[in-house]
Amino acid sequence: VEPERKDDHRDRAMSESKSPGYKHVAYSEIAAEDGRVELEKENIVRPALYSILAGLGAFMFGYTLGFTSPALPAMYGQNSAQVFTVTDCNDSNISSQTGSLFSSIVNIGAVFGAMVAGRLADYIGRKFALASAAIPLVAGWVWLAMVRDPTQAILSRAMAGVGVGMCSSLTPMYISEIAPTAYRGALGALNQLLITIGIFGVYFIGYLLPHEDTTYNSCPNATTSTISTHWPTLAWIGAALSSLLFFVANLLPETPVYLLKIGQTQRACTVMKKLWGRDFDTDDYIRMSIAGRHPDSNRLSVNDDIDGGEPVGRFVSSGSGAGGLEHGDNHAYDDDDDQDGSSSVSFGELCSEESRMPMIIGCGLMLLQQWSGNNAVIFFCSSIFKTAGLDNTDQASLYVMATQVIATGLSVYLMDKAGRRLLMLMASVGMAAASGTLGFLFLLQHGSQKPPGWITIIALITYIIFFSIGMGPIPWLITGEIFPNRTRALGSSVATMVNWFSAFGVTFLFANMEESLQDYGTFWFYTSILGFAFIFVFILVPETKGLSNWEIQLALKRKNPFGERETSEFKSNGNFK
């Protein structure tokens, strides 16, 4: 295909969007229909490798959250590693107000980390921001490993939480910006997979560490429990892995989105070809990036002006690759509203027409993820397994996390096959059915009937599977891909803050909910939330599978929440993100 003909196809795709009854199709489909373009398979090896390396941040996210499960009992134990004091004298309920604060304070730290992450990603770049997330993580883990004072332990946990919040925002953002369109779902799902592997990892290491008989002080009549008293080892491992994150992140390439944002066009073109292959058409990518930053430019032709500035033809020529840029101008991408990189991006822009719907969708999905009841299911795991006749809670926790890892791994395969929207709708229905069933089974326990243990186990596993393929990974994935390039860092940061505020609220209110609604009422409450989640996704959430950022913005701008693609299945030619 001659380059000028490819431009004609793009202009045709743009111009046809004005037609009544328009159904959105990629310009690569139009070209393919004309028989002039041979579709190429996008390069996946390097993006996958870099996504896995960046995913070390997601692993630390999971490792930090899962730390309290194997460590907290030992931190109460009467041993050399004791931190907290038991006041309840009930071996089955060793929690205290201080210990609960230690567990949940990571959420507050993560809120501040998410708040910083967006700005930092815009000022110093995605990869250096991710590397900087390792600093509070290392400091928090080292501090925790060395202290035996409750106050210092809580403060160190909060410091590590800052790093977790930064990782939770930056990792999906980085992966989304380096992933080829056709594989963005699968690579984006790696984020959640590595989170679950991190949780499973800390559980498994805690299970392998030496155990010993321990009693809890202030409890003269307390029985002896066999637990691992080597929680400082887990903290030192966390510090070592966080240090590795710092070095690995510095070796990653910067994302093309950020490089174009700050005007380093030549460098961006070099990175694109490194990521997506030597034949990748960088000029098309830049043109679409400009269209994504200027939502009203979805009908631009190659000679049209952008906001009264230079013609697109000045920014990118009809040639392919970096050589198509005029005189190697490193600022060919800049325009008047973004000369200083991202410093002009304000919180007010998140309420603009182009960012309002992404904000509603991103923040809404984050709220629904936390209020879907996953924390309640994890909290009641011990009770559920005991009902089924399994008394070893350590093994029960490993079973749960192993199931979650396997199911999340399945989501990596399904994400670009079934699509995000369908998986979210299926997950809402499946989780609601499982949560409602668990509520009914707990209600039976309050009466004279004891439900069969196998039914309880099936309901639990069903809930975990549907959460892992839908409500777990997809909010993070969609948040990383639905915002316009210009406001993505700040928008993702705000949505992540909403997630962590919600996580703290769910944890903080859980005990009161259980007391006022009972265990069965708590599960039914989450069932009603999942019913609302189905409606929210059905009405508002677009299908982003196979869509470039420009196409996602076009679908949202046209108030097309379903992202219609009925004309034909999207086929990527490797030239879009």
Image (cartoon, rainbow, N blue to C red):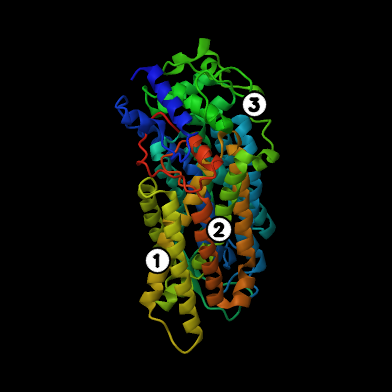
Q: Residue 109 appears at what percent x and percent y?
A: 64, 50
Q: CA distance from mark 2 to mark 1?
A: 20 Å
Residue 102 seen anywhere in this rendered image of the structure: no
Q: Please say if the residues under marks 3 and 2 sit with CB atoms less than 8 Å apart.
A: no
Q: Nearer the viewer, residue 438 or 232?
A: 438
Q: How far across and how far down the image is residue 556, in percent?
A: 54, 42
Q: Residue furthest front?
A: 20
Between 110 and 6, the one lying in front of the other is: 6
Q: Residue at x 58, y 77 (%)?
A: 518
Question: Horizontal and vertical percent for residue 341?
Answer: 63, 27
- Is 88 displayed left or right of 431 in the figure? right
Callout 1: few (<14), some (14-19), or many (20+) C-alpha neighbours within 10 Å? some
In this view, the mark in front (3 or 1): 3
Residue 76 location (% of width, % of height): 59, 66
The residue beneath circle 3 is 338
Kindly identify which residue carries mark 2. 368
**Above-or-below relation of 126 to 320:** below
Assign a secondary structure to mark 2: helix
Q: Which residue is mark 1?
A: 461
Secondary structure at badge 1 equals: helix
Say if residue 192 shows up in the picture. Answer: yes
How far is mark 3 from mark 1, CA to CA? 49 Å
- Identify the amino acid type marked 3: Asp
Q: Amino acid at mark 1?
A: Ile
N-terminal label among 3 and 1: 3
Q: Mark 2: which amino acid?
A: Leu
